Amino acid sequence: MSAALRIGVFDSGFGGLTVLRELLPQAPQAEFFYVGDTARLPYGSKSRATIARYAVESAQFLVDQGIEYLVIACNTASALALDEIRAAVRIPVLGVIETGAASAAAASRSRDVLVLATDATVQIHAYDQACAQHGLRALEKACPLLVPLIEEGWTEHPVTAEVLRIYLDEALRQAQAANSQPDTVLLGCTHYPLLRPLLARTLPVAMRFLDSAATTAEHVRADLVARGLMPKQGIALAAAAQMTDADEPAQEAVGARCHFYATDSIEKFQRLGSRFLGRAMHTVTLMDIGG
Amino acid sequence: MSAALRIGVFDSGFGGLTVLRELLPQAPQAEFFYVGDTARLPYGSKSRATIARYAVESAQFLVDQGIEYLVIACNTASALALDEIRAAVRIPVLGVIETGAASAAAASRSRDVLVLATDATVQIHAYDQACAQHGLRALEKACPLLVPLIEEGWTEHPVTAEVLRIYLDEALRQAQAANSQPDTVLLGCTHYPLLRPLLARTLPVAMRFLDSAATTAEHVRADLVARGLMPKQGIALAAAAQMTDADEPAQEAVGARCHFYATDSIEKFQRLGSRFLGRAMHTVTLMDIGG
């Protein structure tokens, strides 16, 4: 076992790879272990007890790989199973919802935040509760077509632009009716960072958007430093380690310090996952965690 | 127990309700038992052994309700588990893929058929094999966005029209490259009948489309008569029993002779299911079939 800090990242699928992508430059000397529980997705339609059981199983598997820090990059599991995961493992655990809400609280002046998320995340009002703890009002907008459009690869497609425009129009009309003036858009789904260029062109100028992948990575870095798990100079290294997708030696280095596990369909995980991670995924291991 | 013929219909979700909708007028004196295994969908990403186990469990549950005939209204289960289901139950079993292919064989003159289906159905080449048995060449086109668009309720939406146009363009270009001249479009997904009006406006005039919901219902009726399970005059009754959605007394009669079971989220099943069935679903029972 090497001396590098080992960080676990868990998601029900490959969306959480956008979080890992942001983590790589933030913790440049860490080794990463990613689990995508693809055989049992979508979590959103399952009961709280079932989701907690699944998430704890994956967390336990990651702990067995020697991780010292765990990031829950799955919105459903962050909303419904964070307490159970924290009770089951003896390492620090951070979830995407709390970091997203904290960043929105730091960014918003109007104290009204528009949250774009999946139907499942909106139905459990995951961001509503997390934002309320920061004195923010969240207007949650379900955008069920965005994940399928992203998985189809239509991230810059006119159809996706039109769907996004329709969702934003509906959300802003709902905001007006509720006398809400959101100045910040929080992307409450780990698929959505792939829509950043489209969002930048579609959003009204007065609004800024935050994605929970980037905000989570920033919180993890700060937390690692605060806990003494990463030296402060890690931050300087991080800036130096910023990689572009064309940077081949850096890509190889990334491959060497990332370990990917999926519970079903390795081929699909590699094919779709590479787009979410922004670089090729050479080795994915099939993982059997029971059914 | 009444003396009415009991027919079971099984799907992984609520798409199979389009098949039930077509069956109602075809077997007007039968009682129907529908299982949607919503807790474990999508079947398409799971292994053959897992799908067979799930489908056999549901088939067995339906047999326990006293059904004498079983319709597998799930494309994945029809493709991967029909033999296992037939081996497990002692009643006749019919699957949507074989009936769709048989109807396409009767309709096509060019012997080339374009099949629109989900990614999972295309990847296992379910229709390719079934069509080949009838001497037909199937060009299978995966249309992953259609199910989410239908579930969003955008069945007549300009965005859906545009997506359908893009998929058809791609498919017809692929057909041309393969020197294939499809004259028939087979809808190989039980969600797609909700797109009938849009398809009628979008397809080239020279092409006709068949949906596997309507073709399955016709095959079931003929098979019931051939097996002596339904009198021939059932056909005359069927014509008399054709119901419109506004026909309130007929709707009540339908409610009384349909029993719905879902394995998760009764509320979503009722809300979405009503659109697929074309009428309100008053009672859905939560069913625990292990997991």
Image (cartoon, coloured by chain):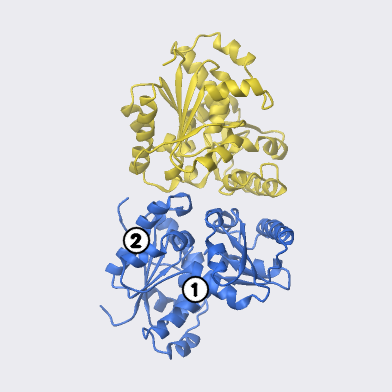
Chain colours: A yellow, B blue
Residue B199 image point, x, y percent: 66, 67
Q: In this view, does B178 lie above or below B8?
A: above
Q: Which amino acid does label 2 sit on?
A: Val
Say which label, 1 or 2, has the lower sequence index. Answer: 2
- Camera-nearest residue between A23 and B175: B175
Q: Do the residues at pointers 1 and 2 share their chain? A: yes
At a point 42% along the width and 53% down the height, the residue shown is B48
* Residue A151 in view (yes/no): yes
Q: What residue type is labelled 1?
A: Thr
In this rendering, is residue A276 above or below B247?
above
Q: Which chain carries label 2?
A: B
* Quadrant position of residue B103: bottom right
Q: Mark 2 points at which residue?
A: B56
Q: Is mark 1 on a helix, strand or loop?
A: helix
**Is residue A104 something that shows in the picture?**
no
Query: Is the residue marked by circle 1 packed among few (<14), some (14-19), or many (20+) residues within 10 Å?
Result: many
Residue A53 marker: none
Residue A18: x and y, percent? 56, 32
Q: Which residue is drawn at 59% across and 26% down?
A: A107
Closest to the observer: A162 or B77? Answer: B77
Quadrant of res B221: bottom left
Q: What element carries label 2?
A: helix
Q: Provide the chain ID for the residue under circle 1.
A: B
Report crowding for label 2: few under 14, some 14 to 19, many 20 or more residues within 10 A (C-alpha). many
Residue B159 in percent (x, y) is at 67, 55
Residue behind mark 1: B216
Decide if residue B25 is on the left or right side of residue A159: left
Q: Is residue A118 left or right of residue B223?
A: right
In the drawing, does residue A235 fall left or right of residue A159? left
User: Where residue A156 sits: x, y (%)?
Assistant: 70, 42
